[in-house]
Image (cartoon, rainbow, N blue to C red):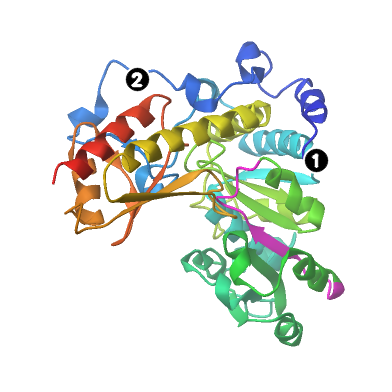
């Protein structure tokens, strides 16, 4: 468990933003309790777009999370002045490293961008000729070993560098696959349970063969401890999404770990132009917003927030259970989106509607409610809701299930 005293001591230092946002940055609070007030102009309505209550989670297709007002204030401030982009990244990287007790850090273009530039940094080091050469990996170490069960679509972030993926199932296979072309070992935390090689053994293999290890923790906040855990376990690079549990800019993320790899990764990012990372620009506004989002997250009362989510989920569960024939299951995923969640199932001989039809009714209603699920159940989370919306969801779900 992270020491609250250490965080408070770290946050007491002079922040990059100085007195810009006042004491509001450091006030413990639930992030969604201070959401930015809507502006007078209703842009989404003008564009003919429906907004909705997010009962699904931090999906990119649903635009991730809502940023607290302190974060949007930092973004607005960033738009008011010019600053040297590299110097800003330097200072914010040091600040984040201080907060997270790691060697170094940088704000990336999401976890996907962190994966690409992180691997590019490992492949090329500080050699600018090699930097300009990618994605041509001729003469360079260009193989990344991953577990077969960790091979998901997001590994495109790795192959974007020109690297090749080598898939293995066991630790023995991994050691046999290591050769002079092996650049990195990559681990997907969301699929930890599916892979035979666990954290400690994975890191040990990397250290044994002097090969850097990278863990993708895109959706692994909460718990807050994960922000510190994996660098302490010995992973050389760790990536987090900025627009999920941290409630920062949706297009931002964090790359943490060893300074030598992150400094090398930065050579692939703007303002440099002849690199594979040129299009992964993180502007000054997002850099500041991500830093403030992290400060806020570390100061949050995580126990109180968890209790809120539990009570919200129970409210919705109880409402659904009041309909005859309905069953619910409250669960917490062990990795990725580790929050109280709800599965709602029912006997369709007694409740004559399919989960897909019920989800459509929820989305087509007023207000619209977005959920997840499959042909057997509806899945609901509350952590992306504005407090109070859980009552609307509970009532609407009951109405939909009782309406047939």
Q: Residues within 10 Å of mark 1 (few under 14, many from 20)?
A: some
- List x then y, in percent, for residue 27: 64, 17
Q: Report whether residue 251 is seen.
A: yes
- List x then y, in percent, for residue 218: 57, 52
- List x then y, in percent, for residue 168: 64, 82
In the image shown, does 288 or 155 lie closer to the viewer?
A: 155
Q: What is the chief secondary structure element of the magenta stretch?
A: loop
Identify the element where label 2 is drawn: loop
Could you say which quadrant of the image residue 141 lies in? bottom right
Q: Residues within 10 Å of mark 2 (few under 14, many from 20)?
A: few
Residue on which disc 2 sits: 38
Q: Residue at x 21, y 37 (%)?
A: 399
Describe residue 190's horizontal placement relative to residue 259 as left or right. left
| Label 1 to label 2: alpha-carbon separation | 36 Å
Describe residue 404's horizontal placement relative to residue 239 as left or right. left
Describe residue 183's horizontal placement relative to residue 204 as left or right. left
In the image shown, does 318 or 395 lie closer to the viewer?
A: 318
Identify the element where label 1 is drawn: loop
Is tag 1's residue or tag 2's residue first in the polypeptide sequence?
2
Q: How many marks?
A: 2
- List x then y, in percent, for residue 297: 62, 31
Specify start and end residues of the magenta stretch as a single range: 208-223
Q: Report whether residue 20 is seen.
A: no
Residue 101 disc label:
1
Describe residue 234's horizontal placement relative to residue 133 as left or right. right
Above or below 74: residue 397: below
Residue 76 disc label:
none
Q: Residue at x 32, y 34 (%)?
A: 394
């Amino acid at each position: 468990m992270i020491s609250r005293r250490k965080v408070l001591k770290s946050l007491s230092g002079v922040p990059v933003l100085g007195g810009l946002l006042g004491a509001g940055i450091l006030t413990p609070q639930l992030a969604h309790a201070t959401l930015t007030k809507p502006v007078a102009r209703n842009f989404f309505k003008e564009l003919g777009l429906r907004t909705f209550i997010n009962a699904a989670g931090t999906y990119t297709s649903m635009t991730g999370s809502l940023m607290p007002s302190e974060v949007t204030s930092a973004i607005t401030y960033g738009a008011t002045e010019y600053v040297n982009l590299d110097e800003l990244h330097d200072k914010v990287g040091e600040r984040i490293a201080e907060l997270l007790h790691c060697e170094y850090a940088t704000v990336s273009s999401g976890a996907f961008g962190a994966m690409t530039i992180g691997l590019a940094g490992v492949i090329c080091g500080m050699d600018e000729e090699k930097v300009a050469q990618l994605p041509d990996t001729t003469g360079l170490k260009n193989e990344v070993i991953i577990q077969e069960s960790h091979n998901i679509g997001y590994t495109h972030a790795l192959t974007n560098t020109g690297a090749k993926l080598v898939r293995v199932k066991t630790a023995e296979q991994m050691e046999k696959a290591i050769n002079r072309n092996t650049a990195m070992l990559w681990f997907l935390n969301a699929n930890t349970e599916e892979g035979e090689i666990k954290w400690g053994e994975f890191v040990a293999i990397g250290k044994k063969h002097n090969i850097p290890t990278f863990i993708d923790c895109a959706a692994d906040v909460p718990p807050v401890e994960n922000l510190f855990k994996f660098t302490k376990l010995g992973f050389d690079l760790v990536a987090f999404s900025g627009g999920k549990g941290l409630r920062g800019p949706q297009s931002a993320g964090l790359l943490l770990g060893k300074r030598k790899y992150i400094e090398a990764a930065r050579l692939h990012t703007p303002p440099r132009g002849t690199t594979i990372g040129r299009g992964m620009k993180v502007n000054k506004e997002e850099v500041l917003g991500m830093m403030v989002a992290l400060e806020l997250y570390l100061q949050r009362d995580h126990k109180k927030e968890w209790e809120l989510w539990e009570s919200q989920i129970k409210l919705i569960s109880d409402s659904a259970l009041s309909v005859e024939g309905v069953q619910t299951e409250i669960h917490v995923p062990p990795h990725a989106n580790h929050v109280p969640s709800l599965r709602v199932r029912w006997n369709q001989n007694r409740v004559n509607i399919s989960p897909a039809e019920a989800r459509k009714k929820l989305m087509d209603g007023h207000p619209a409610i977005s959920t997840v699920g499959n042909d057997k159940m509806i899945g609901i989370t509350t952590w992306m809701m504005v407090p109070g919306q859980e009552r609307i969801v509970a009532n609407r779900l009951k109405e939909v299930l009782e309406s047939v």
